[in-house]
Image (cartoon, grey):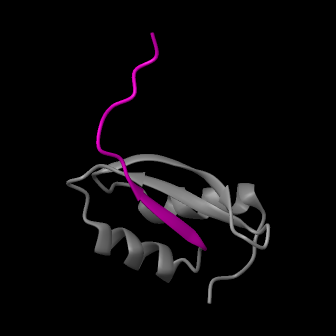
Amino acid sequence: MAKTMTATAGKREAQTALRGMDGIDSIGMAWDSQGHPVVRVDLSPDADRAAVERRLSAADVPYLLRTVKGTVTAL
């Protein structure tokens, strides 16, 4: 089971673990049902989801993966 950490520390750990990987659209934060912070990683449809999961698991970071199927553009 992943360790509990602050939102900032979790995001920093995830950014380090995922550095250099293709298909990462964004890294942010979310909270689980108990109110603990988890890293939210938005993936493009062509991202290697299994590789992302392996890296985050190895870094012992609690995470939530989402696949983004389009581009959001601010007008």
Q: In x, y percent, where is residue 51?
A: 31, 72
Q: Is residue 17 left or right of residue 45?
A: right
Q: Residue furthest left?
A: 46
Q: Residue furthest top?
A: 75
Q: Main secondary structure of the magenta part?
A: loop
Q: Magenta residues, as a range? A: 62-75
Determine if the magenta segment contains residue 66.
yes
Q: In the rendered image, which quarter is residue 50 located in? A: bottom left
Front residue of this view, candidates 35 and 21: 35
Q: Is residue 52 left or right of residue 59?
A: left
Q: In the rendered image, which quarter is residue 36 located in? A: bottom right
Q: Relative to 72, say whether 38 is above or below.
A: below
Residue drawn 63% across the image and 83% down it: 2
Q: Relative to 53, say whether 65 is above or below.
A: above
Front residue of this view, candidates 68 and 7: 68
Image quarter hosting the N terminus: bottom right
